[in-house]
Every structure is written in structure tokens, then in C-alpha cells.
Image (cartoon, rainbow, N blue to C red):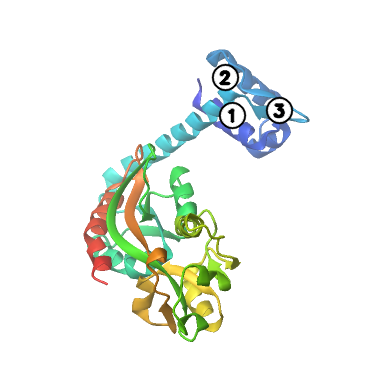
Amino acid sequence: MDFRDLKYFEVIAAEGNLGRAAERLHRTQPALTKCIDRLEESLGARLFEKDGRGMRLTAAGQVLVKRTRQMGLMVEETAREMQDYAGGLRGNVRIGCLPTLAEHLMPHVFERLLAEAPAITVNLHVAMNDQLLTGLREGELDLVVGPVVDSDPDIACEQIAEDMVVVMASENHPIFDTSRTLADLLDYKWMLPARTVASRQWLDQTFERHGLPRPQAQIESNVLNTILPILEKTSLLGFVTRYNLVTRRARVREVVLEETQFKRRLGLTYRNSAYLSPVASRIADILRASGQVLLEF
């Protein structure tokens, strides 16, 4: 198989239409048809089938797309590895990080890193863990600092710290006027992350295990740095890490209930098959050592 044919095939698969793929690749449709013919002859399997005016992948085609993307990442990472060995502790690293860790952990990491390697550049992507893991799997990130990932054969993850996610509300919220139960929390609406986020899933499952409906989210946000000011000014409840109480920038309190205390393991995550540059490996070492910073809060 020719690697160029594979890259053309990847674009055709993404577009699902020869005409659009030809425009994107600046090639003719007959040239792309010959590309598909060569691959199918080489593999002994059909890669596409008709789908209305377009085309869709067969089962064999879906396997080949996955392998082609993996090969593309290997080629890209090989080029980066050669440049890194030529340049020493320099280059670019792409890190994904939870908002809480970006605020409380990464300053310590960057303090040490930039003192050792002043020539490096970093792309820091701050988001929720579901978005970060997608970016990691697709090769857009080198490292992710977030919740520990279990039982994924394509991902390696090692725990570096822990935090506690708890219910919070404005310090003047009526929830603090009397004793409270888990059911009492359902009298109020919430500000929560999306349902794909691990902490939200844990909270929903906690209510369901106690035979209660899920909390009603009035505001869903993927930027949880805004949650404390919003909780301070509204009657909403939130589910956020206790580390946010350390800064004391908003007048909020923890709604203390043992059932809603979620101990979250925080880890350093990377793809099993990925190349980690010297800079990425050094950052990983610093993160392992800096996890103690969070444990001291």
C-alpha cells in the first residue's frame, strides 16, 4: 500500500463524497477512484459502498480508517522525535488539564519547567475530562492531567493526587437554615457540567442509588471557573472540588453530606503507543512530584 493512497482514502472517508474529497485534496475524481481501486485490490476487500449520492465505509473500511490515523500519528511523532533528539530539551508540548488543576497545580509545574527549559513552548488546553480524553485519543494532546482513567487498553494512567468533589452553595442559601438530607437537595436547581463528565455521572448515580430522581440542572457549563461567582449570586447548588474553597474568592460554603462527597483520583494520562518527547517526559516527572502540592491543601 502507498501511504499517499492511505491519506487520500482517509479524506474520502471523512467527506463521504468523491467530489468534496477531490476539492479538498486538489485532485480529480478519477484519480481518487483509482486510489480506492488500488487499495481494494491490495487488501482484497471493498472499502466503500453506495449511500444515496454519497458513499460510506464498509466494515473493512472502518478498520482501515482507524489504522490509517494511527499510522499518520506515528509518522508525525517520528518527525517530532528526530527534531527533539537534534534539539535537546526544547520544542513544543501539548497539555490538557482540568480547570481546577490548571489553577492550583500547573503554576508549580511551569515554575520548575521554565527554569530548566526556557526555550520550550506549551499549548495548554483547559477543559473538562471528556473533551481532554477525546483530544488525547485523537493525537491532539500529548499529556492529560485529570481524573484517573481505568480499563482503557489504549491509555496509560498513573495517579498523582486526590481531591474531594462536594456540593456547594451561597453562604446565605436557605439550605443551611435547617438540617438536611439528600432528598432536600432536590428542592433546588443546580449548576452542573455536562452528563458526559465523570463527576456529574457520579452525582446522578448517587441520587439514583437512593431511589431519588437526578438533580435538575438549570445551568450546564463546560467552564467551571465561573461556578463560584454564579453560586454566590443565585439559589443554585453546585458540585465542585473543595480546592475551590482554598482561594476564598467567592462567598460559598460546602453543603456537608457524606453521601455527596466524591473522592476523585487525579492522574497523569497519555496514549500507550505514543512517543513522549524529552520535554513531555520531563513534565511528566515534574507532575508526579508536584502532586504533593495538591495533597497539602
Say what amino acid the circle numbered 1 marks. Answer: Phe
SS under mark 3: helix
Question: Residue placed at 63% from the left, 32% from the top?
Answer: 12
Q: Position of residue 77 (x, y in %)?
A: 38, 40
Residue that appears at 45% across and 34% down: 70
Q: List the residue tagged with mark 2.
A: 39
Crowding near pointer 1: few (<14 within 10 Å), some, many (20+)? many
Query: Which residue matches tag 1?
Result: 9
> How far from the left and from the top, in percent, is residue 270?
35, 46
Front position in the image: 47 or 114? 47
Q: Is tag 3's residue or tag 1's residue first in the polypeptide sequence? A: 1
Q: Identity of the amino acid at label 2?
A: Leu
Q: Is residue 223 left or right of residue 52?
A: left
C-alpha distance separating marks 3 and 1: 12 Å
Residue under label 3: 29
3D distance between C-alphas at marks 3 and 2: 16 Å
Q: Earlier in the sequence, mark 2 or mark 1?
A: 1
Secondary structure category for the residue under label 1:
helix
Badge 3: residue crowd in 10 Å (few <14, some 14–19, many ≥20): some
Image-based side of 237 in relation to 280, left or right:
right
Question: Circle 2 — which element?
Answer: helix
Of residue 7 and residue 96, the one placed in the foreground of this image is 96
Residue 139, image quadrant: top left
Left/right of residue 20 with respect to residue 234 in the rendered view: right
